[in-house]
Image: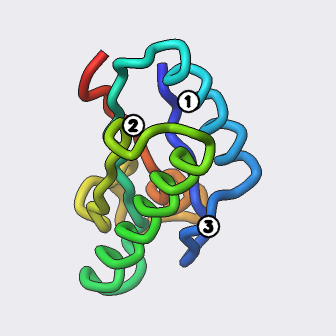
């Protein structure tokens, strides 16, 4: 099961914890050479819709770039930002822990 990676507030860089999880994904993809992955990146609800779409796009790009940098072919990984449109935790108001759970990249297996 592919675990999501999480981002710091207002950031799109891969954290040490995120890198550790992505390295597991690289190993799985290397064991399954036909596997194709789609990364869905999200933000918390702070910030404007437009800002959050741009931030989630940057998160998707950094997630994809990390995997490519580890030797995964470009045609096996793609990503898209979804802003705050698909929260993992629906909350109003949200506490910091809930915001943190919403700042993530999740992985869908497009092809096995």
Q: Mark 1 points at which residue?
A: 25
Count of marks, rendered view: 3
Q: Badge 3 is on which residue?
A: 13
Q: Earlier in the sequence, mark 3 or mark 2?
A: 3
Q: Position of residue 88 (x, y in %)?
A: 37, 47
Residue appearing at x 50%, y 38% in the figure: 72
Is the residue marked by circle 3 packed among few (<14), some (14-19), or many (20+) residues within 10 Å? some
Mark 1 or mark 3: which comes first in sequence? Answer: 3
Q: Is residue 25 left or right of residue 44?
A: right
Q: Residue at x 25, y 28 (%)?
A: 110
Q: Dot 2, crowdedness within 10 Å: few (<14), some or many (≥20)?
A: many
Disc 1 + disc 3, Cβ < 8 Å: no
Left or right for 38, reference 62: left
- Mark 1–mark 2 distance (CA, rounded to whole Å): 9 Å
Q: Which residue is drawn at 58% across and 60% down?
A: 7
Q: Mark 1 Cα within 10 Å, few/some/many (few <14, many 20+)?
A: some
Q: Quadrant of the C terminus?
A: top left
Q: Are marks 3 and 2 in contact (CB under 8 Å)?
A: no
Q: In this view, does 71 lie above or below 92?
A: above
Q: Quadrant of residue 87?
A: bottom left
Q: Distance between the residues labelled 3 and 2?
A: 17 Å
Measured from the top left, where is residue 103 in percent x and y?
48, 59
Which structural element holds mark 1?
A: helix
Residue occupied by mark 2: 107
Q: What element carries label 3?
A: loop
Q: Which residue is drawn at 51% across and 56% down?
A: 65
Q: Distance between the residues labelled 1 and 3?
A: 17 Å
Badge 2 element: strand
Residue 50 versus residue 96 in the image, above or below: below
Where on the picture, by quarter, is residue 23?
top right
Q: Marks 2 and 1: in contact by CB < 8 Å?
A: yes
């Amino acid at each position: 099961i592919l675990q999501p990676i999480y981002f710091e507030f207002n950031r799109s860089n891969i954290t040490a914890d995120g890198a550790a999880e992505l390295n597991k994904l690289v190993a799985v993809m290397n064991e399954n050479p036909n596997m194709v992955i789609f990364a869905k990146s999200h933000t918390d609800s702070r910030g404007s819709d437009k800002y959050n779409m741009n931030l989630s796009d940057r998160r998707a790009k950094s997630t994809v770039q990390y995997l490519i940098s580890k030797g995964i072919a470009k045609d096996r990984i793609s990503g898209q930002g979804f802003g705050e449109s698909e929260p993992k935790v629906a909350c109003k108001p949200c506490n910091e822990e809930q915001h943190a759970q919403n700042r993530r990249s999740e992985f869908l297996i497009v092809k096995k």
